[in-house]
Image: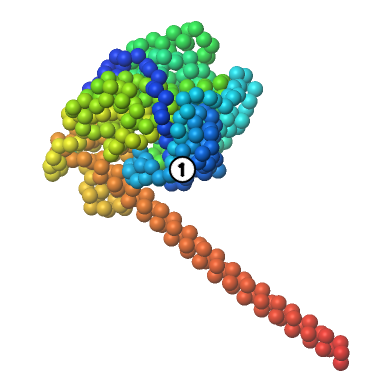
Amino acid sequence: MFKLWSFPGGIHLDTHKEESCRAPLQFARLPKELIYPLLGRGGLNSKPMVEPGERVLKGQVIARDDSPMNPPIHAATSGRVRAIEQRPLPHPSGLPDLCIVIDADGKDEAIEFEGLADYRGQGPEALRARIHEAGIVGLGGAAFPTSVKLDPGERRHIDTLVLNGAECEPYITCDDSLMRHCPGEVLGGAKILMHILGVARCLLGIENDMPEAIAALEAELLQGEYPGIEIVPVTAVYPTGGEKQLIKVLTGREVPANGIPADAGVVCQNVATAAAIHKAIIHGEPLISRIVTVTGLGIQRPQNLLVRIGTPIAELVEQCGGYTESAQRLILGGPMMGLALPIDELPIIKSANCILVASGIEIIGEKQAMPCIRCGECANACPVNLLPQQLYWYSRADNLERVRDYQLADCIECGCCDVVCPSHIPLVQYFRSAKSKVAAKERERKKADHARERFESRQARKEREKLERAESARRKKELLEKIKDSHM
Ligand code: SF4
Ligand code: SF4
């Protein structure tokens, strides 16, 4: 029997998974237009590789950046670039930014994909380069570049790959659907990941309320050659699917504060990322589509759709029968950690696992906030052992030093504290705001450090030039005196 561990806190939530699981997985229709935001990590825009009017093919790179943090962007179908223009983004800022807009031509013509069935002949570096070139980022929601995560550095010894199939947030079932329908791609991706990392052990953590997905994975394990891979059902407690929480549950190891899983000898990847890696390496297909859950009481026919990246959300809503009368809020992600969207004319991006069209009763944190009664429920629920009550006081008071002392950076914004707070205080909102203030202050500090360094190096250069001029004048004088002496 596999030994499981537990993490502190956590809560039991109504899962609302069955709504979107009733209908079979379907292909989303080919949209008329696809939208590709150029904004990448670190606030930098990728550079367009195409021009307005140019014809593009499915799988063609349309934008890239020099940084390994921003993998290339690929067209998800064939068509013509209509414009490179400002469009609203599915981003917390809600501000518009540059996007490549493609008019689909309906032909769906693709470039030639070059697969690599015998990937074992390739070393980790070559495979990571392929994964980067295929545009793969973490599909669990964080969109961290996968090739970077697969390069933990020589200093760290990795012995375990954890595959995250513990889709713990209510309403979201895209990973469940993927594991039911494509277990071979998930486990095939796991084998490639194990080869890259040089590990002999892979633990696939999956919540025990997904019996069909577990059965599909186990059947695939029996049929294929998957040495070292274990399917491990875990208790459905929110947020078991958090990276650090799942690692703790499966291995008993703690990822240190301010550390990464690799510091505990583990690399963790989402199951959908593993499947995308399988497609990219074996079939040469870049990341141009993903499964998206469209659900909530505000949508007529909740379901999972295989969607091309860049598809406008409005097209998915239409394919799911449109909005119901109770639709009140559009959320990208789940009710706990999702991002409220102002409009549906926004594209599906790589990290978009769910579109929740929430009715009033499905929206968390809508009740009138009351004063804190110091009950401590938030601390009991916190899976990271933080003190949300203190973080709340200091966030409210803009005391950024103290929020740092109380480890705000470790908050995974899971929302457990919000849900249990009897005073309905929107704690996570305070924490997000405090985090962005800390980040802004850090940026200011770096800017000031940079300006100071530039000033100091300018001063040093001036001083050096002054000394060089004095030295040159001295030499010149010496030479002149020598010439004068020789004429005498
Ligand atoms: S749960 Fe709410 S009321 Fe209770 S201590 Fe935490 S913030 Fe205060
Ligand atoms: S949102 Fe942050 S503080 Fe609140 S329970 Fe989750 S990790 Fe803890």
- In the displayed structure, 48 sits above or below 242; it is below
In this view, the residue in front, 260 or 308, is 308
Quadrant position of residue 118: top right
For residue 445, above or below residue 253: below
Residue type of the residue flagged with mark 1: Ile
Q: Is the residue indicated by label 1 positioned so its CB lies within 8 Å of ligand 2?
A: no
Label 1: which residue?
A: 84
Residue found 32% across the figure and 51% down from its top: 437
Q: Is residue 343 visible?
A: yes
Outermost residue toward the right? Answer: 487
| Residue 108 relative to residue 86: left or right | right
Write the residue at 62% across / 71% down.
464
Say which residue appears at 58% left-offset and 33% top-offset.
129
Instruction: Pinpoint residue 227: horizontal percent, then vertical percent.
Output: 52, 14
Q: Is residue 175 visible?
A: no
Please provide percent x and percent y for residue 32: 41, 29
Q: State the quadrant of the N terminus.
A: top left
Q: Nearer the viewer, residue 296 or 161?
A: 296
Label 1 crowd bin: few (<14), some (14–19), many (20+), radius 10 Å: many
x then y, percent, for residue 130:
57, 30
Number of numbered tags placed on the structure image:
1
Residue drawn at x 63%, y 25% as measured from the top left: 122
**Secondary structure state at the residue bearing disc 1:** strand
Image coordinates for residue 39, horizontal then vertical, percent: 44, 43
Q: Quadrant of residue 2?
A: top left
